[in-house]
Every structure is written in C-alpha cells, then in structure tokens.
Image (tube, helix red, strand yellow):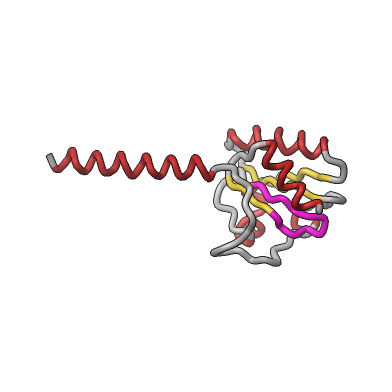
C-alpha cells in the first residue's frame, strides 16, 4: 500500500513538472526577477560576429540538440524577413565564458538584442516564429 502511494506521488510530481516546463518552453520573456541584470549587453566581440543594424537574434546551441536545428531555421527565416536583423548561432561549448556570464542553462537559448546589444528578450527552448517577430518589434522600437 505504501509503495502505491509513493508511486502515485512521484507520478503526480512528474506530471506537474512536465506541464510547467511545457508551458514555459520557448517563451520569450523580459529579463526581470532573480538573476536579471538590467544592463546586460552583448558586444560584437563577444559573439565573434557583427551585430545587426536594427537587432540581433543570438542562439546558443549544442552539437546533439534536435530543437536547435528547428530554432536555427525559424530564426534564419525571421532574420531574412526583417531588414537590419542578424542571426548569430553560437556553440555553447565553445563560448563557456559567455554562457556563464549570461546564465545560459540549456540549449537552445535565444537572446533578442537591440541595435546597441542590450538583451531585450530571452527564451530557453524553441520559440515560435510569431513570438520572435513580436520580440523583434520591442527590440527595434
């Protein structure tokens, strides 16, 4: 009987965790709350590439990340659609100092930068195309 109660509790906890993660995955949020640094700025030297004239989409990826490929496609399409927007993909393992500084915990992580390199939105997981376009609207203002 005790084993059944433990199994049900574990199943319930796992279900709640899965639902919460599913709801938060890929959502582009403002950097607020714990761990947020309002003046977080990413320079072209940090990326090893030029920033876009109007905005930059930065993607942290890893070699065996399946959602990273889909994210690359979405961000590339959006960057082609909007003039002055660049897409930069970084291998998280090759940029560990930047990963630590920006508190990147999983791949893909997407940062939306304004023209000056300030982080205006961020997502952990694969964002939807419409959400990326909306986040660019905030960055380009």
Does the magenta-highlighted stretch encompass residue 115?
Answer: yes
For the C terminus, the image quarter is bottom right
Q: Is residue 25 left or right of residue 76?
A: left
In front: 78, or 99? 78
Return the x and y of residue 89 as percentages of the image width and height.
72, 44
Q: Which residues are magenta?
A: 110-120
Q: Residue at x 72, y 44 (%)?
A: 134
Residue 106 located within the stretch drawn in magenta: no
Numbered label tally: 0
The answer to whether 64 is drawn above or below residue 138 in the figure is above
Q: Quadrant of residue 25?
A: top right
Q: Which is nearer the eye, 46 or 72?
A: 72
Front-lying residue, 12 or 45: 12
Secondary structure predominantly adopted by residues drawn in magenta? strand
User: Could you say which quadrant of the image residue 84 lies in?
Assistant: top right
Residue 72 is situated, as x and y percent measured from the top left of the image, at 70, 36
Tell me where residue 131 appears, x and y as whole percent: 67, 41
| Quadrant, the N terminus | top left
x and y percentages locating residue 97 in the rendered image = 65, 59
Picture residue at 78% right of the left edge, 58% below the top: 117
In the figure, is residue 97 to the left or right of 140? left
**Residue at position x 18%, y 38% in the image:** 4
Reply above or below: 48 against 25: below
Judge left or right: residue 89 versus residue 84.
left
């Amino acid at each position: 009987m005790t084993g059944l109660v433990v199994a049900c509790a574990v199943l319930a906890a796992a279900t709640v965790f899965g639902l919460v993660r599913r709801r938060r995955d890929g959502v582009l949020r403002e950097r607020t709350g714990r761990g947020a640094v309002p003046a977080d700025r990413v320079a072209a030297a940090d990326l090893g590439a030029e920033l876009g004239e109007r905005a930059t989409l930065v993607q942290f990826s890893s070699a065996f990340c399946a959602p990273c490929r889909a994210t690359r496609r979405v961000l590339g399409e959006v960057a082609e659609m909007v003039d002055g927007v660049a897409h930069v993909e970084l291998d998280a393992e090759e940029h560990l100092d930047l990963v630590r500084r920006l508190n990147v915990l999983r791949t893909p992580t997407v940062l939306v930068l304004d023209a000056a390199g300030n982080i205006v939105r961020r997502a952990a997981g694969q964002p939807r195309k419409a959400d990326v376009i909306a986040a660019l609207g905030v960055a380009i203002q």
